[in-house]
Image (cartoon, grey):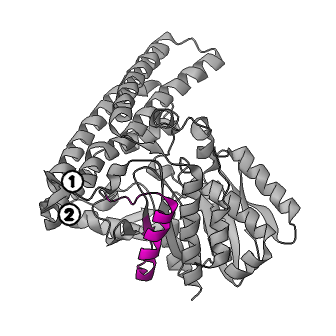
Amino acid sequence: MKEIYEKLLADIPDYTTFYTLEELDAHSRALAAAYPEICECFSFGKTVEGRPLQCLKVGNGAHVGLMFCCPHPNEPIGTMMIEYLSERLCADEELRESLDYTWYFVKAWDADGLKRNEAWLKGPYTVTNYSRNFFRPASFKQVDWTFPIDYKNMHFHDVLPETQAMMDLIDRIRPEFIYSLHNSGFGGVYWYMSEGFPELYPLMHEAAEKGGIPLHLGEPELPSVPVLAPAIFQLNSMKDFYDFVEKYMPGVDPAAMINFGTSSSEYARDLCGSFTLLTELPYFYSAMVGDQSLSDLRRRDAVLASMDWEQEANRELREILAVSEAFLDPEDPYLLAVKDFSVDDGNAAQRALIEQDPEYDRLATRAEVFDSQHGKRFYKLLQYGMLVRANEDELARMEAAGEKDETKRAALTQAFRLAEAAHRAFAADLEEHLCYQATPIRKLVRVQLACGLLVAERLKG
């Protein structure tokens, strides 16, 4: 890596908290005012709730790059990386010339959702606090999964305003490089790429090692995702997912199961050949995520046991939800999310692959067992937190409006207490068994930025 990039990585501040939406927007406006010849801050659309979507344009290089944060609003690591990178690009002409990009930075694509995560952004950074104040929208309400698509029997055109705004921006700037700034909650570092790029794989691993964050060597998010290298995966398109369901669930129409659209990666690739990178980094990690010693469990048994447990957790979520669902706004974002994430429809295709793939015959590594037994449960805990918030928010609205419906209040209170007790017990168990540490923000920014620089440089060639 060039010396100027090494210095850039070495100078990252020791951030102690994440910024709020208001702080991010204010910093963008201040940066554009300080460097008007280099930086422009402009609105490129509005959110569902009417908030302006801001974009920073920095530099005038020969290549075009687009970085957007909070495609999932619970994933703000990229906001801090862009805060730092945009400031350094404006202040350092040599850095701008070395990269030779015109950059477009969106700090908060799902701005509405980021607001709903603000209660945990300043800490404390614990699994309990994060999950209790977590929000992530249902699949069909996610800004990066509601791009239009027509494929076989699937026709999705319910495009969100935020998605339409990003489509218009991509149409206009036609980026060569898209850095989709996602991050995970628990585990280690892993990557998605829109196409194979073998020369990058060892460099990505090296960036993680230098940043002091272990690789995620447990189970992939979905068993259908192609593995390019350890902790590096092919970014599947919606067409790939449709074909996967079609193959492993014969007789089932995939279009009847899939309630969302395609992503910015597939849209931009088809439009102008953009290369998309995701660097998934964890707020919380454990040394167990990289343990490659063998366990005494077959990988198939460990994964299927985890899926069985998840079905039971989904059943409990639905039972608690049934206590008060009739009194909740059917468009409540927490309600929609819990209902969407507690269905088991997609499990049949995944189970079929796991049963048939000989790769699952071998003994599981301890990292894979840990991920199946504890890592996957971390993500289910987040849905319990949203179930608490669905009832909590409706009770707060009743109080603010002076609503006197005691039947409604009793149902909401009962569901709130059931959900809160389940969340509290579940969180306490994970606090005991995850053996985790909170990852310093500076480390997260360093690895994410290093990987972006590696790709940006090589795409120029």
Q: Amino acid at mark 2?
A: Tyr
Is the C-beta separation of discs 1 and 2 under 8 Å? yes
Which residue corresponds to mark 2?
Answer: 248
Quadrant for residue 398, please give it: top right
Q: Amino acid at mark 1?
A: Ala
Image quadrant containing the N terminus: bottom right
Which element is circle 1 on?
Answer: helix
- Residue visible at 38% across and 47% down? 286
- Residue visible at 23% across and 50% down? 369
- Residue 349 location (% of width, % of height): 23, 58
Give the mark nearest the N terminus, 1 or 2.
2
Viewer-nearest residue: 23 or 239: 23
Which element is circle 2 on?
Answer: helix
Q: In 3D space, how far apart are the residues under numbered discs 1 and 2 (Cα atoms)?
A: 8 Å
The answer to whether residue 212 is above or below residue 375 is below
- Residue 77 location (% of width, % of height): 57, 53
- Residue visible at 79% across and 68% down? 90
In the rendered structure, the answer to whether residue 205 lies left or right of residue 117 reads: left
Residue stretch in magenta: 191-217
Which residue corresponds to mark 1?
Answer: 348
- Residue 440 location (% of width, % of height): 55, 49
Quadrant for residue 393, please give it: top right
- Tell me the tag on residue 10: none
